[in-house]
Image (cartoon, rainbow, N blue to C red):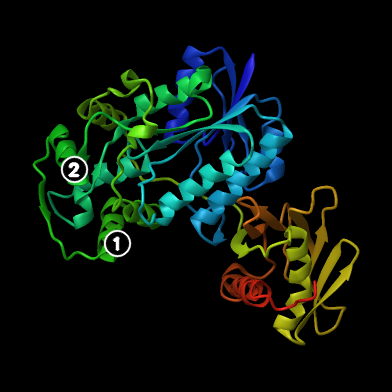
């Protein structure tokens, strides 16, 4: 029996896909989730997996032939998250393809976003494209589906739409609500995802997946209001600034701003399919908008939006660094530890002994942080160091610092994962955490101006 892995299985698309595959295919499904879940089907196995951990995803993927990648991270994944959602997305996708290459994964199906031609993309859409590029450059056969708004219960975009219509009798809309799109029903998307698994003729290509109706977001608001029998009045006001509209949507819908802000920025783009990349089976995308809306509204969860809530007080900090030509992640890690004492002058020193790196304050006996390189899990394109002690380190389970190459060696990601500080939480947030961020930004500038500019720097 084939084993299929679904990353993002607990999301609204993942859950619908699992239901379809269990009914239609004789496959074993491995669903990945950040929390512990109980399976109620003999062919469904839930695995707790942190996609920021290459070790976790490598263990979870064992024995799988094909995989769906339905992940898009815009909500915090730690008690304190430093960095951008697009850098978080990039590291998770990179972990996925590293694990896939290790297990010789045969096929990946990725559901991303519609990409407008010839426009400067919002970071939300740019992130989707970066993930797509990462998967396609992996040499694993990858099928890419690009979609705009997916009409389905509990999807983040549809939840925003539904709550705006339910809670506002009158809407004064900004100009971006006049942009056009072709929303697609969740069930049609699931049909296409299913077909990508079983039909080899469509595998390895890029397809735009869109519904049968072309309309503006304002039209969509009116149609939704009509279905739930609300007489919502809609007006357009050209002078509403984007910042105000984002704030207003967050306030009314109670959806976290981490989700609202990137989505609203993307709505200025027309989400229209490229005729050259249309899904070849037209009959798979014929669910009418009204039918899709009715189905989604009937099964929608009316409760508060629940994102992932970390139990432990932990830290994730990710920064994107330029990778100088001819260098690798191993060089960047070495350069970082050589450069760090110059940034702190005489305050903090770094002592390197074999695979162990010790930061001390003035005197070598005052060890503030101790890192140990994982020899067996490090390579020239990824350096991994575990946090093993020091006055500023709390009790660590998997706290680690890594430097890894991404996007075909164009960048190096410096990432601190699952770090638990020794300082009281609020003191840490406004002292050590800020210093760490300042250090990484300074190191980023160091790489840009002192290495890329051509000035000679000793490694």
Image coordinates for residue 440, horizontal then vertical, percent: 63, 70
Measure the alpha-carbon separation of dots 2 and 1. Answer: 19 Å
Callout 1 secondary element: helix
Q: Is residue 396 above or below residue 200?
A: below
Q: Which residue is drawn at 38% across and 27% down?
A: 279
**Disc 1 target residue:** 247
Q: Is residue 70 above or below residue 168?
A: above
Q: Which label sits on residue 26?
A: none
Dividing the image into 4 quarters, which one contains the N terminus? top right
Dividing the image into 4 quarters, which one contains the C terminus? bottom right
Q: In which quarter of the image is residue 358?
A: bottom right
Residue depth check, mark 2 versus mark 1: number of the one nearer the observer: 2
Query: Camera-side residue: 368 or 142?
Result: 142
Q: State left or right for residue 129 relative to residue 423.
A: left
Image coordinates for residue 124, horizontal then vertical, percent: 42, 52
10 Å crowding of disc 1: few (<14), some (14-19), many (20+): few
**Disc 2 target residue:** 221
Query: Camera-side residue: 412 or 340?
Result: 412
Image coordinates for residue 154, horizontal then vertical, percent: 36, 37
Q: Which of marks 2 and 1 is nearer the N terminus?
A: 2
Q: Which residue is drawn at 70% across and 81% down?
A: 343
């Amino acid at each position: 029996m084939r084993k299929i892995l679904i990353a993002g299985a607990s999301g609204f698309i993942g859950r619908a896909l699992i239901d379809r595959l269990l009914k239609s295919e004789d496959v074993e499904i491995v669903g990945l989730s950040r929390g512990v879940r109980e399976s109620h089907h003999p062919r469904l196995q839930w695995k707790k997996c942190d996609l920021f951990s290459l070790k976790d995803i490598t263990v979870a993927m064992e024995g799988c032939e094909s995989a769906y990648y339905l992940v898009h991270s815009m909500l915090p994944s730690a008690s304190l998250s430093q960095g951008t959602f697009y850098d978080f997305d990039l590291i998770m996708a990179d972990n996925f393809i590293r694990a896939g290459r290790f297990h010789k994964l045969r096929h990946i199906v990725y559901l991303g976003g519609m990409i407008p031609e010839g426009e400067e993309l919002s970071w939300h859409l740019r992130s989707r494209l970066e993930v797509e590029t990462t998967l396609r450059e992996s040499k694993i056969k990858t099928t890419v589906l690009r979609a705009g708004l997916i009409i389905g219960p509990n999807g983040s975009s549809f939840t925003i739409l539904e709550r705006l219509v339910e809670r506002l009798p009158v809407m004064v809309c900004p100009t971006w609500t006049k942009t056009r799109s072709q929303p697609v029903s969740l069930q049609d998307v699931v049909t296409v995802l299913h077909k990508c698994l079983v039909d080899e003729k469509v595998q390895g290509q890029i397809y735009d997946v869109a519904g049968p109706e072309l309309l503006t977001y304002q039209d969509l608001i009116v149609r939704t209001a009509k279905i739930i029998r609300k007489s919502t009045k809609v007006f357009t006001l050209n002078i509403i600034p984007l910042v105000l509209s984002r704030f207003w949507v967050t306030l009314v819908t109670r959806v976290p701003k981490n989700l609202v802000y990137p989505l609203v920025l993307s709505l200025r783009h027309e989400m229209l399919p490229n005729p050259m990349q249309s899904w070849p089976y037209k009959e798979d995308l014929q669910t009418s908008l009204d039918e899709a809306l009715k189905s989604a509204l009937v099964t929608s969860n009316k409760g508060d939006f629940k994102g992932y809530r970390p139990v432990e007080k932990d830290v994730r900090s990710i920064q994107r660094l330029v990778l100088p030509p001819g260098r690798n992640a191993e060089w960047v890690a070495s350069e970082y530890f050589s450069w760090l004492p110059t940034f702190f002058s005489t305050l903090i020193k770094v002592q390197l002994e074999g695979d162990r790196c010790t930061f001390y304050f003035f005197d070598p006996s005052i060890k503030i942080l101790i890192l140990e390189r994982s020899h067996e899990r490090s390579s020239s394109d990824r350096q991994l160091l575990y946090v093993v002690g020091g006055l500023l380190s709390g009790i660590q389970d998997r706290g680690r610092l890594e430097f890894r190459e991404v996007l075909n060696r164009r960048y190096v990601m410096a990432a601190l994962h699952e770090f638990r500080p020794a300082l009281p939480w609020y003191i840490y947030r406004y002292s050590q955490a800020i210093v760490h961020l300042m250090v990484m930004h300074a190191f980023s500038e160091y790489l840009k101006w002192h290495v890329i500019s051509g000035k000679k720097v000793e490694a």
